Amino acid sequence: MSPAPDLGRKPRLGYTESHLERAAELRTDAAAMARLAADAGAGAYVIGGDLMVLKKAAPLNQAMFSLAQARELAPAGTIVFLGLHQGAGRFGFGIAPAAAEALKANEEFLVTDLRSIAVQGLVDAEHLPPMAEAKAVLHWHLRHRYCANCGAATLVVQAGWRRDCPACKAEHFPRTDPVVIMLAIDGERCLLGRSPRFVPSMWSCLAGFVEPGESIEDAVRRETREEAGIVCGRVKYLASQPWPFPSSLMIGCFAEARTREIVVDRAELEDARWFERAEIAAMLARKHDGGLTTPPPVAIAHHIIRAWMEGEPGFD
Ligand SMILES: [Zn+2]
């Protein structure tokens, strides 16, 4: 293998390393919840569907509001207890998507999607994990107001971490959807693809949902074969990332390619091809002759590709 290039300091993976202690034991403690909500140090992230409400400030915008300030912005649909930061409560304050949209007209606020906030660094990075937590669980509430078993309206319990059906007594929990995202390796080359949704210059790892009854390893092999026609052998896990668009967990892996001829599934991908190390190094450094790039450091794909350049996964 070629020597690992010096890629500089490793960037932080977006939405990970939360500073919050989730303190799940407090979710059923109504007195503790009331005390935390009334505390002057309580903070809330205000979210309406895909839109996050920030208070404009320089150099970084303000991500959190007091609960009183949040209530002045719009009535809360659902409030979720996210956890504790140095003893103070942190909450997700869900407002109607239309109310968030309406706040765009107010010059005091910046109302935008979480992806833009993360990629453009619009708030202190420490807010990204709790914002992801709040966005994912509030999205689940918006889409799960009725019992999946009997159709009755359900009630929010456990500080936003469960919905109970008063009719059939079913308990419903917020879900997370596992997605495998992988880099297939053929010696000194790796396989990247392009989705039609990507910005024109960007190439990334292949990815797909894990299906019921499927292991992570089998999902990696199936998706790589379906999307690019490449048969893979060994699979090695690298890292994972919450991906609240709307509620996925990205499971980052390497896969050992056993075949070389690519057959692109045009329904899924615009294109896929092998990339040599030198080309990937140029893409990571944003110095590619043709302007091609890898995904930004906020995304796990960047970290998987970079880890390969630095010597992972060692299949050889
Ligand atoms: Zn029910």
Image (spheres, rainbow, N blue to C red):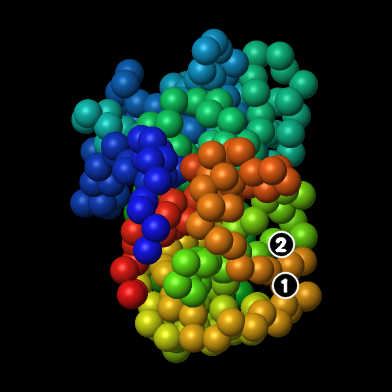
Residue at 59% x, 46% y is: 283
Is residue 122 shown to the viewer in this render? yes
Q: Residue pushed farthest top?
A: 58
SS for tag 1?
A: loop
Check the image and report above or below for 114 versus 156: above
Check the image and report above or below for 207 versus 102: below
Answer whether labels 1 and 2 touch (C-beta < 8 Å): yes
Q: In terms of depth relative to the viewer, which is nearer, 116 or 38?
A: 116
Circle 2 crowding by C-alpha within 10 Å: few under 14, some 14–19, many from 20: some
The three-letter amino acid code for the residue at tag 1 is Glu
Disc 1: which residue: 268
Is the shortest distance between ligand 1 and the CB of mark 2 under 8 Å? no
Residue at 65% x, 65% y is: 193
Residue at 71% x, 53% y is: 198
Give the percent coordinates (x, y) of residue 116. Answer: 62, 36
Disc 2: which residue: 195
Give the percent coordinates (x, y) of residue 115. Answer: 60, 42
